[in-house]
Protein backbone atom coordinates (compact mmCIF):
# COMPACT_ATOMS: atom_id res chain seq x y z
CA UNK A 1 0.00 0.00 0.00
CA UNK A 2 2.85 2.36 0.85
CA UNK A 3 4.52 1.57 -2.48
CA UNK A 4 1.29 2.40 -4.33
CA UNK A 5 0.94 5.62 -2.39
CA UNK A 6 4.51 6.57 -3.23
CA UNK A 7 3.91 5.93 -6.94
CA UNK A 8 0.77 8.07 -6.88
CA UNK A 9 2.57 10.91 -5.14
CA UNK A 10 5.36 10.69 -7.71
CA UNK A 11 2.87 10.76 -10.61
CA UNK A 12 1.03 13.78 -9.22
CA UNK A 13 4.27 15.65 -8.65
CA UNK A 14 4.49 18.82 -10.70
CA UNK A 15 7.29 17.67 -13.01
CA UNK A 16 5.68 14.32 -13.74
CA UNK A 17 2.28 15.85 -14.40
CA UNK A 18 3.78 18.46 -16.71
CA UNK A 19 5.48 15.74 -18.75
CA UNK A 20 2.32 13.67 -19.10
CA UNK A 21 0.28 16.79 -19.83
CA UNK A 22 2.63 17.57 -22.72
CA UNK A 23 2.45 14.00 -24.03
CA UNK A 24 -1.34 13.93 -24.02
CA UNK A 25 -1.37 17.34 -25.67
CA UNK A 26 0.82 16.10 -28.53
CA UNK A 27 -1.36 13.01 -28.85
CA UNK A 28 -4.36 15.32 -29.13
CA UNK A 29 -2.72 17.35 -31.91
CA UNK A 30 -1.83 14.12 -33.72
CA UNK A 31 -5.35 12.62 -33.48
CA UNK A 32 -7.28 15.80 -34.34
CA UNK A 33 -6.36 15.31 -38.00
CA UNK A 34 -8.21 12.01 -38.42
CA UNK A 35 -10.41 11.47 -35.32
CA UNK A 36 -12.12 14.37 -33.58
CA UNK A 37 -13.30 12.13 -30.73
CA UNK A 38 -9.79 10.82 -30.01
CA UNK A 39 -8.27 14.27 -30.40
CA UNK A 40 -10.71 15.80 -27.95
CA UNK A 41 -10.23 12.94 -25.50
CA UNK A 42 -6.44 13.39 -25.44
CA UNK A 43 -6.68 17.17 -25.40
CA UNK A 44 -9.26 17.06 -22.62
CA UNK A 45 -6.98 14.78 -20.62
CA UNK A 46 -4.10 17.25 -21.05
CA UNK A 47 -6.36 20.04 -19.78
CA UNK A 48 -7.36 17.92 -16.78
CA UNK A 49 -3.74 17.17 -15.91
CA UNK A 50 -2.82 20.84 -16.05
CA UNK A 51 -5.75 21.70 -13.80
CA UNK A 52 -4.72 19.01 -11.32
CA UNK A 53 -1.17 20.32 -11.53
CA UNK A 54 -2.22 23.63 -10.05
CA UNK A 55 -5.52 22.95 -8.38
CA UNK A 56 -6.54 25.11 -5.40
CA UNK A 57 -6.24 23.74 -1.91
CA UNK A 58 -9.73 25.00 -1.14
CA UNK A 59 -12.82 25.34 -3.23
CA UNK A 60 -14.72 22.93 -5.46
CA UNK A 61 -14.96 24.99 -8.63
CA UNK A 62 -11.95 23.54 -10.52
CA UNK A 63 -12.84 20.02 -9.33
CA UNK A 64 -16.31 20.29 -10.84
CA UNK A 65 -14.84 21.88 -13.95
CA UNK A 66 -12.40 18.99 -14.32
CA UNK A 67 -15.23 16.48 -14.02
CA UNK A 68 -17.28 18.30 -16.65
CA UNK A 69 -14.33 18.64 -19.02
CA UNK A 70 -13.55 14.96 -18.66
CA UNK A 71 -17.15 13.93 -19.29
CA UNK A 72 -17.38 16.24 -22.30
CA UNK A 73 -14.09 15.09 -23.81
CA UNK A 74 -14.71 11.38 -23.32
CA UNK A 75 -18.46 11.17 -24.01
CA UNK A 76 -19.17 10.30 -27.62
CA UNK A 77 -22.94 10.85 -27.68
CA UNK A 78 -23.89 14.40 -28.61
CA UNK A 79 -27.01 14.44 -26.40
CA UNK A 80 -24.74 14.21 -23.34
CA UNK A 81 -21.80 16.05 -24.81
CA UNK A 82 -23.51 19.33 -25.77
CA UNK A 83 -25.06 20.26 -22.39
CA UNK A 84 -21.96 19.10 -20.51
CA UNK A 85 -19.71 21.22 -22.74
CA UNK A 86 -22.03 24.22 -22.34
CA UNK A 87 -21.92 23.94 -18.55
CA UNK A 88 -18.15 23.44 -18.61
CA UNK A 89 -17.73 26.56 -20.75
CA UNK A 90 -19.49 28.72 -18.15
CA UNK A 91 -17.29 27.39 -15.37
CA UNK A 92 -14.27 27.76 -17.61
CA UNK A 93 -14.44 31.56 -17.65
CA UNK A 94 -14.77 31.64 -13.87
CA UNK A 95 -11.86 29.25 -13.44
CA UNK A 96 -9.51 31.05 -15.84
CA UNK A 97 -10.24 34.41 -14.25
CA UNK A 98 -9.75 33.24 -10.69
CA UNK A 99 -6.67 31.08 -11.33
CA UNK A 100 -5.26 32.90 -14.37
CA UNK A 101 -1.68 32.88 -13.08
CA UNK A 102 -1.42 29.15 -13.80
CA UNK A 103 -2.13 29.75 -17.50
CA UNK A 104 -0.50 31.93 -20.11
CA UNK A 105 -3.43 34.01 -21.33
CA UNK A 106 -2.24 35.57 -24.61
CA UNK A 107 -3.76 38.31 -26.70
CA UNK A 108 -5.20 35.67 -29.04
CA UNK A 109 -7.14 34.23 -26.11
CA UNK A 110 -8.61 37.60 -25.13
CA UNK A 111 -9.45 38.29 -28.77
CA UNK A 112 -11.56 35.15 -28.78
CA UNK A 113 -13.20 36.21 -25.51
CA UNK A 114 -14.44 39.39 -27.21
CA UNK A 115 -15.70 37.47 -30.24
CA UNK A 116 -17.24 34.72 -28.10
CA UNK A 117 -19.12 37.31 -26.06
CA UNK A 118 -20.68 38.77 -29.22
CA UNK A 119 -21.60 35.28 -30.48
CA UNK A 120 -23.22 34.36 -27.15
CA UNK A 121 -25.07 37.68 -27.09
CA UNK A 122 -26.39 37.20 -30.65
CA UNK A 123 -27.52 33.67 -29.83
CA UNK A 124 -29.05 34.75 -26.52
CA UNK A 125 -31.29 37.23 -28.32
CA UNK A 126 -32.99 34.38 -30.16
CA UNK A 127 -36.05 32.52 -28.86
CA UNK A 128 -35.70 29.03 -27.44
CA UNK A 129 -32.24 29.80 -26.02
CA UNK A 130 -31.72 26.37 -24.48
CA UNK A 131 -32.19 24.66 -27.84
CA UNK A 132 -29.56 26.90 -29.46
CA UNK A 133 -27.05 26.94 -26.60
CA UNK A 134 -25.49 23.59 -27.49
CA UNK A 135 -24.13 25.01 -30.76
CA UNK A 136 -21.80 27.24 -28.73
CA UNK A 137 -20.34 24.33 -26.78
CA UNK A 138 -17.30 24.09 -29.08
CA UNK A 139 -16.21 27.51 -27.81
CA UNK A 140 -15.11 25.79 -24.61
CA UNK A 141 -12.06 24.48 -26.47
CA UNK A 142 -10.63 28.00 -26.52
CA UNK A 143 -8.71 26.83 -23.45
CA UNK A 144 -6.40 25.12 -25.98
CA UNK A 145 -4.85 28.55 -26.73
CA UNK A 146 -3.52 29.19 -23.20
CA UNK A 147 -2.76 25.47 -22.78
CA UNK A 148 -0.51 25.55 -25.87
CA UNK A 149 1.10 28.84 -24.85
CA UNK A 150 1.77 27.48 -21.35
CA UNK A 151 3.23 24.16 -22.50
CA UNK A 152 5.26 25.53 -25.45
CA UNK A 153 8.17 26.48 -23.22
CA UNK A 154 10.83 26.48 -25.96
CA UNK A 155 11.35 26.15 -29.71
CA UNK A 156 11.97 22.40 -29.43
CA UNK A 157 8.46 21.93 -28.11
CA UNK A 158 6.99 24.11 -30.83
CA UNK A 159 8.81 21.98 -33.40
CA UNK A 160 7.31 18.91 -31.71
CA UNK A 161 3.86 20.40 -32.32
CA UNK A 162 4.68 20.60 -36.04
CA UNK A 163 5.90 16.99 -35.95
CA UNK A 164 2.70 15.77 -34.28
CA UNK A 165 0.57 17.63 -36.83
CA UNK A 166 2.62 16.36 -39.79
CA UNK A 167 2.48 12.77 -38.51
CA UNK A 168 -1.28 13.01 -38.03
CA UNK A 169 -1.76 14.37 -41.54
CA UNK A 170 0.35 11.52 -42.90
CA UNK A 171 -1.86 9.00 -41.09
CA UNK A 172 -4.93 10.76 -42.50
CA UNK A 173 -3.43 10.58 -45.99
CA UNK A 174 -2.69 6.85 -45.71
CA UNK A 175 -6.25 6.13 -44.59
CA UNK A 176 -7.67 8.21 -47.45
CA UNK A 177 -5.43 6.67 -50.13
CA UNK A 178 -6.62 3.21 -49.11
CA UNK A 179 -10.16 3.90 -48.00
CA UNK A 180 -11.47 6.42 -50.53
CA UNK A 181 -10.95 4.22 -53.64
CA UNK A 182 -12.50 1.24 -51.82
CA UNK A 183 -15.59 3.24 -50.80
CA UNK A 184 -15.85 4.68 -54.32
CA UNK A 185 -15.64 1.19 -55.85
CA UNK A 186 -18.26 -0.16 -53.44
CA UNK A 187 -20.56 2.76 -54.24
CA UNK A 188 -20.15 2.14 -57.94
CA UNK A 189 -20.98 -1.56 -57.59
CA UNK A 190 -23.98 -0.76 -55.39
CA UNK A 191 -25.33 1.76 -57.90
CA UNK A 192 -25.27 4.73 -55.53
CA UNK A 193 -26.67 7.96 -57.07
CA UNK A 194 -23.36 9.77 -56.51
CA UNK A 195 -21.37 7.05 -58.32
CA UNK A 196 -22.04 7.50 -62.03
CA UNK A 197 -18.52 6.27 -62.73
CA UNK A 198 -15.39 5.61 -60.69
CA UNK A 199 -14.04 9.14 -61.19
CA UNK A 200 -17.19 10.84 -59.93
CA UNK A 201 -17.41 8.38 -57.05
CA UNK A 202 -13.80 9.10 -56.06
CA UNK A 203 -14.37 12.86 -56.27
CA UNK A 204 -17.39 12.43 -53.98
CA UNK A 205 -15.15 10.97 -51.27
CA UNK A 206 -13.09 14.14 -51.01
CA UNK A 207 -13.26 16.02 -47.72
CA UNK A 208 -13.05 19.78 -47.25
CA UNK A 209 -11.66 19.30 -43.75
CA UNK A 210 -9.07 16.77 -44.92
CA UNK A 211 -7.95 19.09 -47.71
CA UNK A 212 -7.12 21.83 -45.23
CA UNK A 213 -5.30 19.40 -42.98
CA UNK A 214 -3.20 18.28 -45.96
CA UNK A 215 -2.35 21.92 -46.62
CA UNK A 216 -1.21 22.37 -43.00
CA UNK A 217 0.58 19.02 -43.02
CA UNK A 218 2.56 19.90 -46.15
CA UNK A 219 3.80 23.14 -44.59
CA UNK A 220 4.70 21.44 -41.31
CA UNK A 221 6.50 18.60 -43.13
CA UNK A 222 8.48 21.00 -45.30
CA UNK A 223 9.64 22.81 -42.16
CA UNK A 224 10.63 19.53 -40.52
CA UNK A 225 12.64 18.55 -43.59
CA UNK A 226 14.53 21.85 -43.35
CA UNK A 227 15.17 21.27 -39.64
CA UNK A 228 16.61 17.84 -40.39
CA UNK A 229 18.74 19.24 -43.20
CA UNK A 230 20.20 21.94 -40.95
CA UNK A 231 20.95 19.37 -38.25
CA UNK A 232 22.62 17.01 -40.74
CA UNK A 233 20.12 14.24 -39.95
CA UNK A 234 18.25 11.86 -42.24
CA UNK A 235 15.27 13.40 -44.00
CA UNK A 236 13.94 10.20 -45.56
CA UNK A 237 11.01 9.59 -43.16
CA UNK A 238 9.67 13.11 -43.65
CA UNK A 239 10.34 13.05 -47.40
CA UNK A 240 8.26 9.85 -47.59
CA UNK A 241 5.54 11.51 -45.50
CA UNK A 242 5.62 14.51 -47.86
CA UNK A 243 5.09 12.29 -50.90
CA UNK A 244 2.17 10.48 -49.27
CA UNK A 245 0.52 13.77 -48.32
CA UNK A 246 0.96 15.28 -51.79
CA UNK A 247 -0.65 12.25 -53.42
CA UNK A 248 -3.58 12.28 -50.99
CA UNK A 249 -3.88 16.06 -51.39
CA UNK A 250 -4.32 15.67 -55.15
CA UNK A 251 -6.87 12.84 -55.00
CA UNK A 252 -8.84 14.65 -52.31
CA UNK A 253 -10.07 16.94 -55.13
CA UNK A 254 -10.79 20.07 -53.07
CA UNK A 255 -9.98 23.19 -55.06
CA UNK A 256 -9.94 25.74 -52.24
CA UNK A 257 -7.11 24.03 -50.37
CA UNK A 258 -5.24 23.54 -53.68
CA UNK A 259 -5.36 27.25 -54.47
CA UNK A 260 -4.23 28.16 -50.94
CA UNK A 261 -1.40 25.64 -50.78
CA UNK A 262 0.23 26.73 -54.04
CA UNK A 263 1.24 30.29 -53.04
CA UNK A 264 2.06 29.21 -49.48
CA UNK A 265 4.48 26.46 -50.52
CA UNK A 266 5.98 28.73 -53.17
CA UNK A 267 6.55 31.43 -50.57
CA UNK A 268 8.09 28.87 -48.23
CA UNK A 269 10.68 27.81 -50.81
CA UNK A 270 11.45 31.35 -51.92
CA UNK A 271 12.18 32.58 -48.39
CA UNK A 272 13.51 29.45 -46.68
CA UNK A 273 15.37 27.44 -49.30
CA UNK A 274 18.97 28.52 -50.07
CA UNK A 275 19.48 30.15 -53.45
CA UNK A 276 21.18 27.12 -54.96
CA UNK A 277 18.15 24.93 -54.13
CA UNK A 278 15.45 27.51 -54.79
CA UNK A 279 14.98 26.79 -58.49
CA UNK A 280 15.09 23.06 -57.90
CA UNK A 281 12.23 23.53 -55.45
CA UNK A 282 10.31 25.54 -58.04
CA UNK A 283 10.87 22.72 -60.53
CA UNK A 284 9.42 20.22 -58.05
CA UNK A 285 6.31 22.39 -57.61
CA UNK A 286 5.96 22.65 -61.40
CA UNK A 287 6.28 18.87 -61.69
CA UNK A 288 3.54 18.31 -59.11
CA UNK A 289 1.28 20.74 -60.99
CA UNK A 290 1.85 18.92 -64.27
CA UNK A 291 1.13 15.59 -62.59
CA UNK A 292 -2.06 16.95 -61.08
CA UNK A 293 -3.29 18.51 -64.34
CA UNK A 294 -2.64 15.24 -66.14
CA UNK A 295 -5.27 13.62 -63.93
CA UNK A 296 -8.75 13.73 -65.59
CA UNK A 297 -10.53 14.12 -62.26
CA UNK A 298 -8.49 17.24 -61.46
CA UNK A 299 -9.45 18.80 -64.79
CA UNK A 300 -13.10 17.95 -64.09
CA UNK A 301 -12.93 19.67 -60.69
CA UNK A 302 -11.35 22.78 -62.19
CA UNK A 303 -13.97 22.84 -64.92
CA UNK A 304 -16.74 22.75 -62.32
CA UNK A 305 -15.64 26.14 -60.99
CA UNK A 306 -18.07 27.84 -63.33
CA UNK A 307 -20.98 26.31 -61.43
CA UNK A 308 -19.77 27.75 -58.13
CA UNK A 309 -19.36 31.17 -59.74
CA UNK A 310 -22.84 31.14 -61.29
CA UNK A 311 -25.74 32.69 -59.45
CA UNK A 312 -28.21 30.45 -61.28
CA UNK A 313 -26.58 27.21 -60.13
CA UNK A 314 -27.13 27.80 -56.41
CA UNK A 315 -23.45 27.64 -55.50
CA UNK A 316 -21.26 29.87 -53.38
CA UNK A 317 -21.90 33.03 -55.39
CA UNK A 318 -25.64 32.64 -54.82
CA UNK A 319 -25.11 32.37 -51.08
CA UNK A 320 -22.76 35.36 -50.92
CA UNK A 321 -24.80 37.71 -53.15
CA UNK A 322 -28.40 36.66 -52.41
CA UNK A 323 -28.75 34.84 -49.09
CA UNK A 324 -26.22 36.71 -46.94
CA UNK A 325 -27.32 40.28 -47.86
CA UNK A 326 -30.99 39.42 -47.30
CA UNK A 327 -30.34 37.84 -43.91
CA UNK A 328 -28.16 40.68 -42.63
CA UNK A 329 -30.75 43.26 -43.69
CA UNK A 330 -33.41 41.45 -41.67
CA UNK A 331 -31.12 40.53 -38.74
CA UNK A 332 -28.41 43.21 -38.28
CA UNK A 333 -27.60 41.75 -34.84
CA UNK A 334 -27.29 38.22 -36.22
CA UNK A 335 -29.54 35.17 -36.31
CA UNK A 336 -27.51 33.35 -33.65
CA UNK A 337 -24.41 31.21 -33.84
CA UNK A 338 -24.96 27.97 -35.78
CA UNK A 339 -28.60 28.71 -36.56
CA UNK A 340 -28.45 28.90 -40.35
CA UNK A 341 -30.20 26.00 -42.09
CA UNK A 342 -30.78 24.94 -45.68
CA UNK A 343 -34.50 25.72 -45.39
CA UNK A 344 -33.73 29.23 -44.19
CA UNK A 345 -31.36 29.84 -47.10
CA UNK A 346 -33.86 28.55 -49.63
CA UNK A 347 -36.42 31.07 -48.41
CA UNK A 348 -34.29 33.75 -50.10
CA UNK A 349 -32.79 31.67 -52.94
CA UNK A 350 -34.88 28.56 -53.77
CA UNK A 351 -32.21 27.29 -56.17
CA UNK A 352 -29.64 26.78 -53.38
CA UNK A 353 -28.42 23.19 -53.46
CA UNK A 354 -29.94 20.81 -50.93
CA UNK A 355 -27.79 19.92 -47.96
CA UNK A 356 -26.03 23.28 -47.77
CA UNK A 357 -26.24 24.48 -44.17
CA UNK A 358 -23.68 27.30 -44.15
CA UNK A 359 -22.41 30.01 -46.48
CA UNK A 360 -19.04 28.41 -47.31
CA UNK A 361 -17.07 31.43 -46.12
CA UNK A 362 -16.10 32.57 -42.65
CA UNK A 363 -16.81 36.27 -43.11
CA UNK A 364 -20.43 36.15 -44.42
CA UNK A 365 -21.24 33.23 -42.11
CA UNK A 366 -20.00 35.07 -39.02
CA UNK A 367 -21.69 38.28 -40.17
CA UNK A 368 -25.04 36.52 -40.58
CA UNK A 369 -24.63 34.59 -37.31
CA UNK A 370 -23.32 37.29 -34.96
CA UNK A 371 -24.14 40.56 -36.71
CA UNK A 372 -21.86 43.48 -37.53
CA UNK A 373 -20.47 43.69 -33.99
CA UNK A 374 -19.50 40.00 -34.04
CA UNK A 375 -17.82 40.35 -37.43
CA UNK A 376 -15.79 43.34 -36.22
CA UNK A 377 -14.68 41.40 -33.15
CA UNK A 378 -13.67 38.47 -35.36
CA UNK A 379 -11.72 40.65 -37.80
CA UNK A 380 -9.89 42.46 -34.98
CA UNK A 381 -9.08 39.11 -33.35
CA UNK A 382 -7.73 37.51 -36.54
CA UNK A 383 -6.09 40.70 -37.76
CA UNK A 384 -4.33 41.18 -34.44
CA UNK A 385 -3.09 37.58 -34.46
CA UNK A 386 -1.77 38.02 -38.01
CA UNK A 387 0.05 41.24 -37.10
CA UNK A 388 1.66 39.59 -34.06
CA UNK A 389 2.77 36.60 -36.17
CA UNK A 390 4.13 38.89 -38.88
CA UNK A 391 6.13 40.93 -36.37
CA UNK A 392 7.59 37.74 -34.91
CA UNK A 393 8.72 36.64 -38.38
CA UNK A 394 10.25 40.07 -39.01
CA UNK A 395 12.21 39.95 -35.75
CA UNK A 396 13.27 36.33 -36.36
CA UNK A 397 14.97 37.21 -39.65
CA UNK A 398 18.03 38.17 -37.62
CA UNK A 399 17.97 34.92 -35.65
CA UNK A 400 19.22 31.51 -36.72
CA UNK A 401 17.62 29.74 -39.67
CA UNK A 402 15.70 27.25 -37.52
CA UNK A 403 13.95 29.99 -35.54
CA UNK A 404 13.04 31.93 -38.67
CA UNK A 405 11.72 28.78 -40.36
CA UNK A 406 9.60 27.94 -37.31
CA UNK A 407 8.08 31.40 -37.06
CA UNK A 408 7.51 31.64 -40.80
CA UNK A 409 5.79 28.27 -41.14
CA UNK A 410 3.45 29.08 -38.23
CA UNK A 411 2.51 32.31 -40.01
CA UNK A 412 1.95 30.40 -43.27
CA UNK A 413 -0.28 27.87 -41.55
CA UNK A 414 -2.31 30.69 -40.01
CA UNK A 415 -2.61 32.45 -43.38
CA UNK A 416 -3.58 29.14 -45.01
CA UNK A 417 -6.55 28.69 -42.69
CA UNK A 418 -7.54 32.34 -43.14
CA UNK A 419 -7.26 32.11 -46.92
CA UNK A 420 -9.21 28.87 -47.10
CA UNK A 421 -11.77 30.49 -44.81
CA UNK A 422 -12.65 32.89 -47.62
CA UNK A 423 -14.20 30.06 -49.65
CA UNK A 424 -14.98 27.56 -46.85
CA UNK A 425 -16.55 27.93 -43.42
CA UNK A 426 -13.63 26.22 -41.69
CA UNK A 427 -14.29 28.03 -38.42
CA UNK A 428 -17.36 25.81 -38.11
CA UNK A 429 -15.27 22.60 -38.13
CA UNK A 430 -14.38 21.84 -34.53
CA UNK A 431 -11.19 19.97 -35.42
CA UNK A 432 -9.95 22.83 -37.60
CA UNK A 433 -10.95 25.40 -35.00
CA UNK A 434 -9.00 23.48 -32.33
CA UNK A 435 -6.02 23.26 -34.69
CA UNK A 436 -6.25 27.01 -35.22
CA UNK A 437 -6.20 27.43 -31.44
CA UNK A 438 -3.03 25.32 -31.27
CA UNK A 439 -1.39 27.48 -33.95
CA UNK A 440 -2.42 30.69 -32.17
CA UNK A 441 -1.08 29.34 -28.89
CA UNK A 442 2.20 28.31 -30.52
CA UNK A 443 2.78 31.82 -31.89
CA UNK A 444 4.19 33.00 -28.56
CA UNK A 445 7.52 34.36 -27.39
CA UNK A 446 9.37 31.46 -25.76
CA UNK A 447 12.24 33.62 -24.49
CA UNK A 448 12.11 33.35 -20.75
CA UNK A 449 8.94 31.27 -20.97
CA UNK A 450 10.27 28.55 -18.68
CA UNK A 451 11.29 31.14 -16.11
CA UNK A 452 7.93 32.89 -16.36
CA UNK A 453 6.12 29.58 -15.88
CA UNK A 454 8.22 28.81 -12.80
CA UNK A 455 7.51 32.25 -11.34
CA UNK A 456 3.79 31.95 -12.04
CA UNK A 457 3.53 28.61 -10.25
CA UNK A 458 5.74 29.84 -7.43
CA UNK A 459 3.69 33.01 -6.94
CA UNK A 460 0.50 30.95 -6.96
CA UNK A 461 1.83 28.41 -4.46
CA UNK A 462 0.12 30.20 -1.62
CA UNK A 463 -3.22 29.43 -3.26
CA UNK A 464 -2.41 26.21 -5.09
CA UNK A 465 -1.61 22.92 -3.44
CA UNK A 466 0.26 20.41 -5.59
CA UNK A 467 -0.63 17.02 -4.24
Image: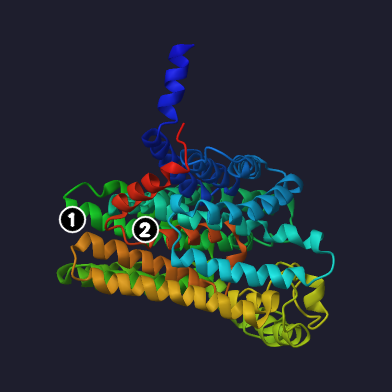
Give me the disc on residue 220. 2
Q: Is residue 287 left or right of residue 193?
A: left
Expressed as whole percent of the image width and height from the top left, the position of residue 135 reads 71, 60
SS for tag 2? helix
SS for tag 1? helix
**Residue in the foreground of this view, choosing between 98 and 209:** 98
- The 10 Å Cα crowd at callout 1, few under 14, some 14 to 19, many 20 or more, is few
Q: Kindly give the residue lying farthest to the top in the view shown.
A: 1
**Residue in the foreground of this view, choosing between 277 and 43:** 43
Expressed as whole percent of the image width and height from the top left, the position of residue 122 reads 72, 73
Residue to which mark 1 is pinned: 230
Q: Is residue 335 left or right of residue 247?
A: right
Expressed as whole percent of the image width and height from the top left, the position of residue 52 reads 50, 38
At 70% across and 71% down in the image, what residue appears?
Answer: 121
368 shown above or below 36: below
Give me the disc on residue 346. none
Q: Is residue 167 left or right of residue 212?
A: left
97 shown above or below 233: below
At 45% across and 35% down in the image, what residue appears?
Answer: 466
Q: How is the image coloured?
A: rainbow
At 34% across and 49% down in the image, what residue appears?
Answer: 455
373 shown above or below 239: below
- Mark sitting earlier along the chain (2/1): 2
**Residue in the foreground of this view, choosing between 438 and 325:** 438
| Residue 298 visible to an observer of this rendering | no
Give the CA distance from mark 2 to mark 1.
Answer: 16 Å
Amino acid sequence: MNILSAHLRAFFAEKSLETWCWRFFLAGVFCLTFSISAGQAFMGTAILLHMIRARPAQGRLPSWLSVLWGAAALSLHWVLKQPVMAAAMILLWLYLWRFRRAWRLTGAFWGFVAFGFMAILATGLQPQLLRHWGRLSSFGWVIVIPLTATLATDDDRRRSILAALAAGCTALALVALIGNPLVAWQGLRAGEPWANDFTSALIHQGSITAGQFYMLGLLATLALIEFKRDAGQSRRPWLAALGIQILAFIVNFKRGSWFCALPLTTGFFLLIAPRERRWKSMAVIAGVLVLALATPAVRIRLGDLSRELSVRQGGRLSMWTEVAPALIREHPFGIGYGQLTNDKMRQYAPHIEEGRTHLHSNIPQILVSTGWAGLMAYLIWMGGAGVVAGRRVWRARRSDTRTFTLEFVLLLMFLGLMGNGLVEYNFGDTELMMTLFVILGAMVDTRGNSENKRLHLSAASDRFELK
